[in-house]
Image (tube, rainbow, N blue to C red):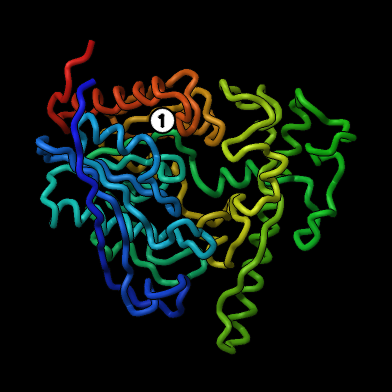
């Protein structure tokens, strides 16, 4: 492939928002303003009327290999930080959607790009689909907790195409499939059902898991998620009833990395290695500080983690998206489940959609430059076919 030098330009965007209470620490959100920070990759001597936007609900993406690799082949790209960078404790997905909308508007109205393409990476996949669905046909006027966040009045600017790459269907579904079904008491994570504790060497159920156990385990994961949701709703109702100034509360969710996939390669098979996940040894991560939903607030649980209450569902959103759509599945992904990419692709309503699998590729392409180059090649070829960028390089 050809090579372009590129500039890295910080981007700061402010938009007004009035909240009934402050959910993020510091200046952001506490003074009637939301301040967003992004990174704009601009190839030199390569003007473009199209920009690719990447946003994850809480991660900052500029250190991933993909943004730089795309900039090096001439793609204009912006990594868009939400108001919750590296801390999803109090994250509200509906508010992240407004943040993404601010970047799309900035790209078109301030920077002058004619076309915006959303690249939904990992947790950004369902976010990008939800944003596009609400931009094309807005329906949301409040959060699952009932707080006003009116996307119908936000005048969200639709993107011109969406890419779903190394991504999962939703935060809520992914968390549920990763939850440790053995936990019986959320306050005491040592209280576990030994027949559901997949890390207990004395558990008679072990890989390869039979279909009966798999069904029971998946059902108990949903039951656990719903128990937390019920408790959250009860606490919120009690706080509202008391009306004494306390409106929110934090809590801990223990043991959230116990997906059967991690220790049984036959469950939702791909080329990942067993007894491993993208964060390392799943048994260690199961109760480590970086686990999904480890630290939560009541409202955040309902918005991003609740199996029944979260609205950011990639499958449902894909059914409402009409623009050109590309799905790339990493064949050895050890983070996003293999089945999610296919479910999203099958659900997508776009008449113009394509799906590719990059065999052997891990979630981050760590130590796999040839797999990353394959992803980049697939992306730019697709963008060219959509007429969103001019032919960038000659290929052999």
Between residue 22 and residue 87, name the one nearer to us. 87
Considering the numbered disc 1 on the image, is that residue within a helix, a strand or a loop? helix
Q: Which residue is mark 1?
A: 345
Location of residue 365 by image quarter? top left
Q: Pinpoint residue 185: horizontal percent, then vertical percent.
A: 80, 58
Q: Nearer the viewer, residue 1 or 121?
A: 1
x, y (%) of residue 336?
Answer: 52, 35
Q: Is residue 73 left or right of residue 332?
A: left
Percent position (x, y) of residue 166?
A: 44, 33
Q: Where on the picture, by quarter, is residue 30?
A: bottom left
Say which residue appears at 31% left-offset and 67% top-offset.
35
Vertical placement of residue 73 versus 358, above or below: below
Residue plotted at (70% across, 58% down): 227
Q: Is residue 203 above or below residue 234?
A: above
Q: Quadrant of the N terminus?
A: top left
Residue at screen point 28% across, 51% down: 39
Q: Nearer the viewer, residue 296 or 350?
A: 296
Neighbour tally class for label 1: few under 14, some 14-19, many 20 plus, Cα within 10 Å: many
Question: From this viewpoint, which residue is outermost toward the bottom?
Answer: 244
Q: How many marks?
A: 1
Query: Which residue is found at the position 54% from the left and 57% from the top?
Result: 309
Vertical relation: 40 (above or below) 73: below
Tell me: 373 left or right of 307.
left
Quadrant (top left/top right/bottom left/bottom right) for the C terminus: top left
Q: Is residue 361 left or right of residue 285?
A: left
């Amino acid at each position: 492939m050809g090579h372009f030098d590129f500039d890295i330009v910080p981007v700061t965007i402010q938009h007004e928002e009035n909240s009934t209470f402050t959910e993020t620490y510091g200046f952001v959100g506490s003074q009637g303003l939301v301040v967003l920070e992004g990174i704009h990759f601009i190839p030199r001597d390569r003007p473009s009327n199209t920009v690719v936007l990447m946003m994850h609900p809480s991660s900052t993406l500029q250190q991933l290999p993909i943004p730089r690799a795309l900039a090096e082949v001439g793609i204009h790209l912006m990594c868009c930080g939400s108001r919750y960078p590296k801390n999803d404790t109090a994250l509200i997905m509906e508010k992240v959607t407004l943040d993404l909308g601010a970047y799309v508007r900035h790209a078109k109205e301030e920077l002058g790009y004619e076309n915006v393409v959303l690249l939904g990476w990992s947790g950004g996949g369902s976010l990008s689909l939800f944003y596009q669905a609400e931009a094309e046909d807005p329906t949301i006027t409040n959060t699952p907790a009932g707080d006003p966040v009116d996307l119908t009045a936000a005048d969200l600017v639709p993107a011109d195409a969406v890419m779903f790459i190394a991504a999962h269907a939703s935060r809520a579904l992914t968390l549920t499939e990763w939850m440790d079904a053995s936990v019986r008491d959320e306050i005491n994570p040592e209280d576990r059902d030994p027949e559901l504790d997949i890390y207990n060497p004395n558990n008679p159920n072990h890989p390869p898991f039979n279909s009966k156990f798999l069904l029971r385990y998946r059902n108990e994961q949903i039951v656990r998620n719903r128990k937390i949701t019920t408790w959250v709703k009860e606490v919120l109702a009690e706080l509202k009833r008391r009306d004494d100034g306390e409106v929110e509360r934090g809590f801990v969710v223990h043991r959230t990395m116990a997906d059967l996939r991690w220790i049984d390669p036959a469950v939702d098979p791909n080329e990942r290695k067993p007894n491993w996940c993208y964060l390392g040894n799943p048994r260690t991560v199961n109760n480590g500080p970086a686990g999904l939903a480890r630290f939560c607030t009541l409202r955040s649980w309902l918005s991003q983690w609740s199996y029944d209450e979260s609205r950011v569902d990639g499958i449902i959103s894909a059914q409402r998206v009409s623009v050109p759509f590309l799905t790339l599945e990493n064949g050895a992904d050890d983070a996003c489940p293999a089945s999610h990419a296919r479910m999203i692709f099958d659900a997508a309503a776009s008449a113009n959609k394509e799906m590719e699998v990059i065999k052997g590729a891990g979630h981050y392409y760590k130590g796999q430059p040839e797999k990353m180059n394959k992803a980049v090649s697939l992306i730019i070829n697709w963008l060219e076919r959509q007429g969103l960028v001019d032919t960038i390089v000659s290929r052999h």
